[in-house]
Image (tube, grey):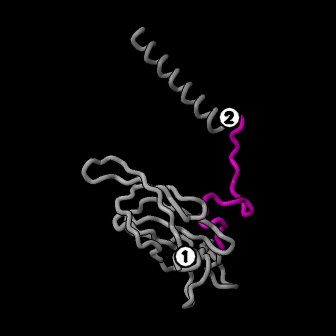
Amino acid sequence: MKKLLIPSIIALLLLAVGFAYFYFFFHGPGATLMAPTASSQPGFTPFGRPPIAASTSQPGAPSNSSATSTSFGTVANGGTIPALRLLSSTPVGGYGASTTGSTTIVRWIDRGRGNVIEAREDSLGLTTISNTVLPRIYESAWNKNLTSFVGGMLETDTGIPTFVYANIVKRP
């Protein structure tokens, strides 16, 4: 009898602790679950504004689904710029993003080549904006205007981290 009593008491205590954890952290006081509405702000939007949703169904045709496509603008040849796109297929050593009055700019450091590359929200093209290479930068922190950064790089022989400060200057 004692052999079954102690394990069953331990099991009941663990069950009670699990229930209390679930209740207090998920359904207890202060935990309110709200369904998202159309007027609520979305979670993360990389360009600082909610996407523009355009219906893919024909006007007047019955719709069986609520499929939508999202785009931020149009390209010069008539195509649309996707809301989510691949900026780099190679490893990057940190990035920074800044929104001006008209567009958003994303800059990052290519880890292999060491160049600073820029992508704009209103264009599909990529621009290499630095002619000085800083290869092997594994991380970087950018200022809010994307004109300078602090980057951490590893030396090949020793593996000791070295930190550099770089300022991007526009030359005539």
Instruction: Report the residue that reaches farthest toward the right.
Output: 39
Asked whether 18 or 168 is in front, the reply is 168
- Whether residue 23 sits left or right of residue 115 in the image: it is right
Label 2 vs label 1: CA separation?
41 Å
Q: Which residue is mark 1?
A: 82
- Whether residue 11 sits left or right of residue 60 in the image: it is left
Residue 106 at x, y percent in the picture: 53, 68
Labelled pair 2, 1 in contact (Cβ < 8 Å): no
Instruction: Report the residue that reaches farthest toward the top.
Output: 2
Q: Is residue 69 visible?
A: no
Residue 101 at x, y percent in the picture: 69, 72
Asked whether 23 or 132 is in front, the reply is 132
Residue shown at 57% from the left, 89% from the top: 76
Residue 87 at x, y percent in the picture: 46, 71
Residue 46 in magenta stretch: yes
Q: Which residue is mark 2?
A: 28
- Whether residue 142 sits left or right of residue 138 in the image: it is right
Which stretch did the figure color magenta? 29-53
Q: Residues within 10 Å of mark 2 (few under 14, many from 20)?
A: few
Residue 147 falls in which quadrant of the image?
bottom right
Tag 1: amino acid: Pro
Q: Earlier in the sequence, mark 2 or mark 1?
A: 2
Q: SS at mark 1? A: strand
Asked whether 54 or 133 is in front, the reply is 133
Relative to 42, residue 159 above or below = above
